[in-house]
Image (cartoon, grey):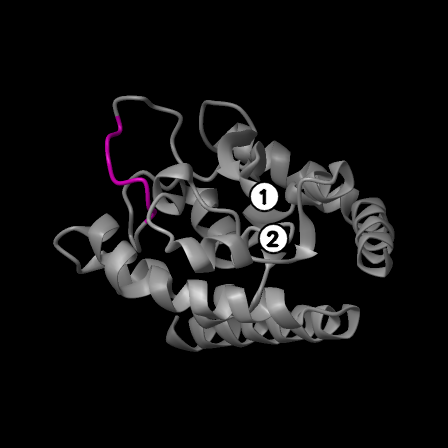
């Protein structure tokens, strides 16, 4: 109850404070490329229930733009503004609405596509899906550069399933077993530090 109350209050406050930024990002997306502002996709939620996640659209809205289900570094399908949105994780901000609706939490295992959940070992599947998925979690922090790691793979989806997914699942199951309101606050702070550190490194390279 404490976690859910925190999620509701924090998500509502964040939306109240960030609405000018959300409006500006929506306008930028609309001006940058043709297509809807939001991207909706079926993801697996708590206890395996499907829901449609919200994201700011960061890729071209073109059915002919074929490619893997995973987004890779330097992916040609990513729009100009989408590169900044993804690098700073701003494309995830609309998921604050998913938190308010009860589909997600601020902190929890990142919700996966059904095709990848099908590869979860049964024991880890039960643990990971026992809690609401979240905007961030320890596994997401550990894999901030996942797109770059997969970019050089001959088969990015298979590489994700075999090399990255097992590590993510162990971290997510461990989170689910130990999660408290205080640990969630710690994860949020670690996420902020990781994103700021990533932005500083990108600025130094530029």
Is residue 24 a member of the stretch shown in magenta? no
Question: Would you say the magenta stretch is mainly helix, strand or loop?
Answer: loop
Is residue 70 on the magenta stretch? yes
Disc tally is 2
Labels 2 & 1 near each other (Cβ < 8 A):
yes
Q: Residue at x 30, y 52 (%)?
A: 72
Q: Residue furthest front?
A: 123
Q: Is residue 95 above or below residue 122?
A: above
* Left-right relation of 4 to 176: right
- 107 vs 39, nearest the viewer: 107
Q: Mark on residue 113?
A: none
Compared with 7, 40 (above or below) is above
Residue under numbered circle 1: 47
Residue at point 26% right, 40% down? 68
> Which x, y percent locates residue 199?
51, 70
Query: Residue 57 at x, y = what percent?
Result: 50, 35
Residue 176 showing in the rendered view: yes
Side of 13 where 47 appears, left or right: left
- Evaluate whether residue 144 shows in this view: no
Tag on residue 130?
2
- Could you tell me which residue is drawn at 62 percent across and 58 percent down? 108
Does label 2 or label 1 sit earlier along the sequence?
1
Highlighted range, magenta: 65-71
The quadrant the C terminus occupies is bottom left
Please name the residue shown 32% across and 40% down the image: 69
Indicate the quadrant where residue 1 lies: bottom right
Where disc 2 sits, the SS reads loop
**The residue tagged with tag 1: helix, strand or loop?**
helix
């Amino acid at each position: 109850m404490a976690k859910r109350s925190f999620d509701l209050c924090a998500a509502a406050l964040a939306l109240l404070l960030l609405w000018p930024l959300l409006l500006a990002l929506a306008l930028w997306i609309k001006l940058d490329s043709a297509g809807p502002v939001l991207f909706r996709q079926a993801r697996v939620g708590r206890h395996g229930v499907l829901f449609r996640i919200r994201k700011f659209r960061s890729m071209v809205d073109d059915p002919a733009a074929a490619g893997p289900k995973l987004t890779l570094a330097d992916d040609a399908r990513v729009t100009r503004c989408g590169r900044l949105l993804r690098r700073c994780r701003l494309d995830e901000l609309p998921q604050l609405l998913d938190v308010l609706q009860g589909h997600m939490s601020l902190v929890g295992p990142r919700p996966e596509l059904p095709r990848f959940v099908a590869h979860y070992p049964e024991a880890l599947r039960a643990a990971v899906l026992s809690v609401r998925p979240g905007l961030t979690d320890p596994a997401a922090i550990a894999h901030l550069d996942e797109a770059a790691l997969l970019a050089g793979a001959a088969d990015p989806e298979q590489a994700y399933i075999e090399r990255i997914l097992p590590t993510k699942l162990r971290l997510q199951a461990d989170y689910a077993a130990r999660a408290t309101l205080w640990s969630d606050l710690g994860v949020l702070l670690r996420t902020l530090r990781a994103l700021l550190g990533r932005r500083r490194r990108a600025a130094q390279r530029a």
